[in-house]
Image (tube, rainbow, N blue to C red):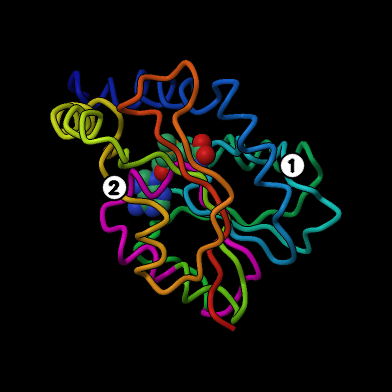
Amino acid sequence: MGIKGWYDATIMPRLITCACSQGQVMKRRAALVPLARGDVFELGCGGGINHAFYDAGAITSYAGIDPHEGLLEGARRAAREKGWVADLRQGRGEAIPFAEASFDCVVCTFTLCSVADPAQVMREMRRILRPGGKALFLEHGRAPDPGVRRWQERIEPLWKRLAGGCHLTRPVASALAEAGFAVEPLGKGYTPKAPRFAGWMEWGVARKPG
Ligand SMILES: C[S@@+](CC[C@H](N)C(=O)[O-])C[C@H]1O[C@@H](n2cnc3c(N)ncnc32)[C@H](O)[C@@H]1O
């Protein structure tokens, strides 16, 4: 394994987990994830960091995917500890390995920044949702301020390499609307104590037309 392979397998997942479990970020998860209802699918579930926030009584089934088998093992363990029957598969959002109209709810937190083809992933999110189903999103992305955006554009090429393909300049709510979802924003803003170039967040509900 070269230095890049070692970095990607050991350091990078820890850095990402650390950034994604910062106090303000956990607060946002705690407000959004309990809105999940019915048959739930989580895109890019990682090590199962959101499990702690689901309202177990409101969920009838839980499934998820992530390309990273090492992270999935953690997610499976976290699900077992909660006594959940969870269908967690290795896979990518560009080709979600579940049939169309299988779910009432898709949960997507800090994943659209990292996928290779966000437009295709959003098509797949729509495909697996039932009519009227909702996607709960919490993502960082393109900042509204031109000064911050310029920094995002400058830093992104290096950032992508250090942070597992994470992009800084992707639009969030507007991209979901463009993908055909009816977006109900719940909030947006810079995350306190985070650098502004990585701290712009948008969260809400994106509904598949019924
Ligand atoms: C920043 S982490 C976020 C993990 C978790 N969703 C969270 O809220 O903390 C990005 C996640 O997206 C996953 N990922 C990367 N490319 C993906 C793809 N094409 N499809 C689905 N997940 C992907 C990564 O393996 C990683 O678990």
Instruction: Give percent across and percent down for residue 46.
Output: 50, 40
Question: Which quadrant of the view contains residue 141?
Answer: top left
Residue neighbourhood size for the residue with mark 1, other residues' Cα within 10 Å, grouped as few (<14), some (14–19), many (≥20)? few
Viewer can see residue 46: no
What amino acid is found at the position of numbered circle 2 in the picture? Arg
- The residue at the point 30 percent across, 29 percent down is 163
For disc 1, the marked residue is 80
Residue neighbourhood size for the residue with mark 2, other residues' Cα within 10 Å, grouped as few (<14), some (14–19), many (≥20)? some
Instruction: Look at the image and give the residue range highlighted in magenta.
Output: 100-124
Instruction: Give percent across and percent down for residue 4.
Output: 20, 24
Of 164 and 109, nearer the camera is: 109
Numbered label tally = 2
Of 61 and 159, nearer the camera is: 159
What amino acid is found at the position of numbered circle 1 in the picture? Arg
Specify whether 136 is left or right of 78: left
Instruction: Give percent across and percent down for residue 76.
Output: 63, 42
For disc 2, the marked residue is 170
Looking at the rendered image, the quarter that the C terminus falls into is bottom right
Which comes sooner in the sequence, label 1 or label 2? 1
Looking at the rendered image, the quarter that the N terminus falls into is top left
Question: Which quadrant of the view contains residue 8?
Answer: top left
Q: Is residue 152 magenta?
A: no
**Viewer-nearest of labels 1 and 2?**
2
Q: Is residue 121 magenta?
A: yes
Viewer can see residue 57: yes
Of 22 and 148, nearer the camera is: 148
Q: Secondary structure at mark 2?
A: loop
Q: Secondary structure at mark 1?
A: helix
- The residue at the point 34 percent across, 68 percent down is 178
Q: CA distance from mark 1 to mark 2?
A: 34 Å
